[in-house]
Amino acid sequence: MKKIFVTRLIPDRGLALLKKQGYEVVVNPEDRVLRREELIMFLEGKNYDAVLCLLTDKIDKDIFAAAGSQVKIFANYAVGFDNIDLAAARERNVLITNTPDVLNETVAEHTFALMLAIAHRIAEADQFMRDGKYKGWGPMLLLGADVSHSTLGIVGLGRIGALVAKHAVKGFDMRVLYYDVKRNEDFEKEFNAEFRPNLDDLLHEADFVSIHVPLLPSTKHLMNADTLAKMKKTAYLINTSRGPVIDEHALEQALEKGIIGGAAIDVFENEPLMDLGFKNLDKIIVTPHIASATEETRQKMGEVAARNIIAALEGQTPPNLVVMK
Ligand code: DGY
């Protein structure tokens, strides 16, 4: 019987698919991230055929070594796979897969939730009400900024970035600029979007800058003291991609000094920690890496991860390969 290790409990549909296939499924009994030594202990000598891992697991050569030569695939339960050492996977002939597409709509929705919330000062307003400070309607009370008809700068025109752009144009009549390593003329035509080959140009013009790049050596701290200073004083920065794309300390400084108007971020440089300075700033909204966290999407991510494992163990090519043998 083939054996699968799941590093932390995920919603049931993916697990059910694996069991239906006749596999033995062992799930980390604790609902928390396993420490590195614990993960090694769970894997060592157990001869698992596959591991379903999460973005919170750092998978490197020691983890592959602990899993042993029986293991064919590490199926990441995330679209991002910056937690996995791909070169080490290739060296050990381990397949790596991810869970793209099923979360696009949910993440795009969360991006808009953040954008609207920071522009309309929703968190501040909610706190204001709870504190009993509302004494009656006022023309100057908690003034925010309009999203409609403003300019959105998309940094990284992947599937999620493109969907955010679509909502921006169709739902809010926004002007869309985008920066990417690749130009996409079809997208430009469809959404009347404008390509900016230079990030600085986009930052100068955008009222909202939304980050959708993967974490790579070239995107680490893409938003830093210099690039933040290129944004408009009134502009907002939104991040639902990966925390280290923003230099968090530089962001705190930029908010404190009024270099930008505000930020709304779902991901952090050293999760689960966040820059402590954020706690005391009104101009930032923070959510705990939940952009894909709807019941249905998290189920679908489990199903995609399970199908990748089943394909690999049944001798087929998994649909979402990021590293081939
Ligand atoms: C991902 O999939 O990479 C997200 O960060 C979590 O869903």
Image (tube, grey):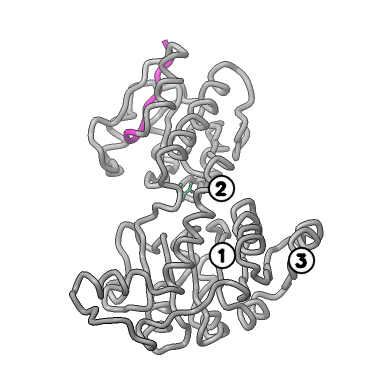
Residue at image coords 56%, 23%: 312
- Mark 1, Cα crowd under 10 Å, few <14 / some 14-19 / many 20+, is some
* Residue at 43% across, 39% down: 298
How many C-alpha atoms fall within 10 Å of the one at disc 3: few (<14), some, or many (≥20)? some
Residue under label 2: 104
Q: Secondary structure at mark 3?
A: loop
Q: Quadrant of the C terminus?
A: top right
Q: Secondary structure at mark 2?
A: helix
The residue under the point 29% across, 43% down is 33
Q: Nearer the viewer, residue 74 or 311?
A: 311
- Dot 3 or dot 1: first in sequence order is 3
Where residue 258 sits: x, y (%)? 42, 88
Mark 3 vs mark 2, foreground winner is 3
Q: Is residue 8 magenta?
A: yes
Q: How many circles with numbers are drawn on the protein?
A: 3
Closer to the camera: disc 1 or disc 2? Answer: 2
Where is residue 319 drawn, in percent x and y?
A: 62, 31
The first of marks 3 and 2 along the sequence is 2
> As displayed, is residue 118 above or below residue 307?
below
Q: Is mark 2 within 8 Å of ligand 1?
A: no
Residue type indicated by callout 3: Asn
Residue span colored magenta? 1-9
Query: Residue 7: x percent and y percent?
Result: 34, 34
- The residue at which mark 1 appears reads as 219
Q: Is residue 95 left or right of residue 133?
A: right
Q: Which residue is mark 3?
A: 192
Q: Dot 2: few (<14), some (14–19), or many (≥20) neighbours within 10 Å?
A: many
